[in-house]
Structure formats: structure tokens, C-alpha cells
Image (cartoon, rainbow, N blue to C red):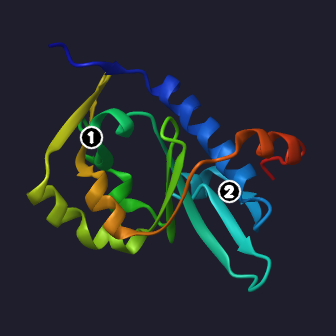
Amino acid sequence: MSIPVYNFEEQLKIGKKGEEIMGKYHAPFYIVTKTLLAQDKQGVDFIFTSYSTEYPWKVEVKTDQKSQDTGNLFMETISKDTTNKQGWAETSQCEVFIQYRWYADEVMYFWMKDIKNNIDEWAKKYRVVAAQNTEYKTWGVLLPLKKAREFTFATRSPINHEWIERNYKTWSNQ
């Protein structure tokens, strides 16, 4: 059995599309502001400012296309093995982590502090695997969906994509 090789640019496009969908999806409930590159590199894709409290939540979005088949979420611990660069589960500076399960049509919401507080324990308990990119490997914990759900503070499903497109055609990454 050969290991699939992931193309970083292709995966980035998928991730950006997921971010766009999540930005539109949350626009009725928050002032959604796309972050600048510097914040994006720190694991903060958006600032969601509550209309009611005006609190600015730092949010990271990851788009998943495998969990419906594997039953697991990939929690990245090493982003690039050739430089031993830590993954988002260790370094993200967001407060809210959104896992957008594309094919399952589900959004899972986590407090990032819960992921950071538990990632080492999960690595001892569950499989740690590599995802092969063209020049390096990314490593992470395969967290079973059942266990992941114990740590979500909310989930939403299904996502009404037609409603999003119909009502938020003018939404833009500010």
C-alpha cells in the first residue's frame, strides 16, 4: 500500500475555500475580519467580533476532507519534520478552533486551550501518523471523532451552502 503524497499548494487552496465558507457562514452572527498574514502565521485566520458583547474572538479554521472515511481528526503536532517545526496544535494563538468537516457537512467548535492541554495525552493514547508532502512530512495525532466530540463546545450540521451563497455574495475578506 503506497502512502499518498499531498501537494501543499493544493491543500492550501482547499483550506482557503473552507475559510471562505466559514467566514460567510458566521457573518450573520459576528463581524468577521480576515487577519493579516502575520496573524495567519500565528494560527489566527479570523477575528469574529460579537455583535452583542463586542468581544473579538481569535479564530482558526481547519478544513477536513478525510474524517468521514477514517473516523478521526488529524491534530497536527509537527508541521514540517525536516525543520522540526511545531504544528498548529502546539503553536496556534487562537482562542476558538473550528474544524470544518467538508464532506460530513459539519462544523465542530473547540476551545484551543483544551486542545493544547490534551494533545500530549492524546499522543500517548492514540495513533501518531505522518502525512507525506513532496519534500517533508507533517505529523499529528489521529483523534477519534467520538473523543473529539467530548471536547467540542458546539457543533453545527448541516451547513446550508445555498443559503450562504444567496445571502452573503457580497461578503469579502476584509
Report the residue at 39% width, 54% height from top.
Answer: 88
Residue at horizontal 55%, vertical 38%? Answer: 15
Amino acid type indicated by mark 1: Thr
Labels 2 and 1 touching (C-beta < 8 A): no
Which residue in the rendered view is the most extreme toward the top?
Answer: 2
Q: Is residue 56 left or right of residue 1?
A: right
Q: Is residue 42 visible?
A: no
- Report if residue 114 is visible in the image: yes
Where residue 130 sits in the image (x, y, percent)?
A: 21, 35
Query: What amino acid is at disc 2?
Result: Thr
- Quadrant of the rendered image containing residue 16: top right
Residue that extends furthest to the left in the rendered view of this protein: 124
Most distant residue in the bottom direction? 53
Drawn side of residue 19 relative to residue 25, left or right: left
Q: Residues within 10 Å of mark 1 (few under 14, many from 20)?
A: few
Q: Nearer the viewer, mark 2 or mark 1?
A: 2
Residue beneath disc 2? 35
Judge from the rendering whether residue 54 lies leftward or rightward of residue 144; answer left or right: right
In the displayed structure, would residue 153 be above or below residue 131? below
CA distance for labels 2 and 1:
26 Å
**Image position, residue 83 (x, y; %):** 27, 40
Q: Which residue is mark 1?
A: 83
Please tell me which of labels 2 and 1 falls first in the chain.
2
Q: Residue at x 63, y 50 (%)?
A: 37
Which quadrant holds the N terminus?
Answer: top left
Q: Please indicate whether residue 142 sits to the left or right of residue 108 in the image.
A: left
Query: Along the line of sight, which residue is nearer the eye, 174 or 71?
Result: 71
